[in-house]
Amino acid sequence: MVQKTKKQMKKMIKTIAIHVIIATVAVFLIVIALSFLVKDDDKGKNRATIKQVEMPYIEEMFITPNDYSRPQLELEQVNAIVVHYTGNPGSTAKGNRDYFENLRIKKTTYASSHYVVGLEGEIIQCIPLTEISYASNNRNGDTIAIEVCHKDKSGKFNEDTYQSLVELVAWLCGKYNLDKDGIIRHYDVTGKKCPKYFVDHEDAWEQFKEDVFIYIEAEQSEIEPVK
Ligand SMILES: [Zn+2]
């Protein structure tokens, strides 16, 4: 008799324990599902839709696929645009693009960028936007990289270069729905002094981001229908 009661008790406790575990797991899963829903909702609320401006003229000169500068790894998402300077005064966009191309043979380092903006405002694309470039260290996997040419050691971009950079970044902000926080410097990723002028002059960097959005707004007002 006593034996049986003990057995029954054990069975009852076991049944209750199983129910408690199932209930706990269910509640846990519901909480996780809800937190995802709330997060998605927040994203939608906080992330304004950036208007798409017209694409600037871009010359496609894709690098030959190779392990050193175009590994053809998929760029799965784009959360930021990273601005760099070449660090090589007077070098051209084509020269920098060719440097990346030649790493295929020289094999001295791993380097590349999606775009290079030149001293005459020319824009060369080296890597398709569906693939990663080797420019921004641990952010290669979720960013678009732009190398920018400069004529002297100060790293300051001339007027033509600056204007093309504004137009390119403005177009990319629309394409990937990125606001000002989505425009970053290599410096913001690793602390490297790149792009030098925009690290030395924080105000010029803030002004650059401002100019990108002034450009986007101006473009919008131009295409607004006349009443
Ligand atoms: Zn850099």
Image (cartoon, rainbow, N blue to C red):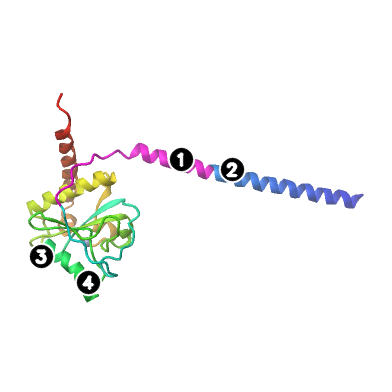
**Which quadrant of the figure has residue 227?**
top left
Q: Is residue 198 above or below residue 63?
A: above
Which dot marks residue 37?
1
Q: Measuring 30% from the left and 55% from the top, which residue is drawn there?
A: 130
Q: Mark 3 or mark 2, which is nearer the start of the sequence?
A: 2
Let me know if residue 45 is in the magenta part.
yes
Q: CA distance from mark 4 to mark 1?
A: 45 Å
User: SS of the residue at dot 1?
Assistant: helix
Q: Measuring 7% from the left and 56% from the top, which residue is drawn there?
A: 120
Give the residue type at disc 4. Answer: Leu
Residue pointed to by mark 2: 27
Q: CA distance from mark 2 to mark 1?
A: 15 Å
Residue 204 percent across, percent down from the top left: 15, 50
- Which of discs 2 and 3 lies nearer the camera? The answer is 3
Which dot marks residue 91?
3
Residue 4 percent across, percent down from the top left: 88, 50
Q: Mark 1 or mark 2, which is nearer the start of the sequence?
A: 2
**Which quadrant of the figure has residue 195?**
bottom left
Q: Measuring 17% from the left and 64% from the top, which residue is drawn there?
A: 97
Describe residue 69's horizontal placement relative to residue 154 as left or right: right
Q: Nearer the viewer, residue 149 or 114?
A: 114
- Which of discs 3 and 4 lies nearer the camera? The answer is 4
Give the magenta range.
31-57
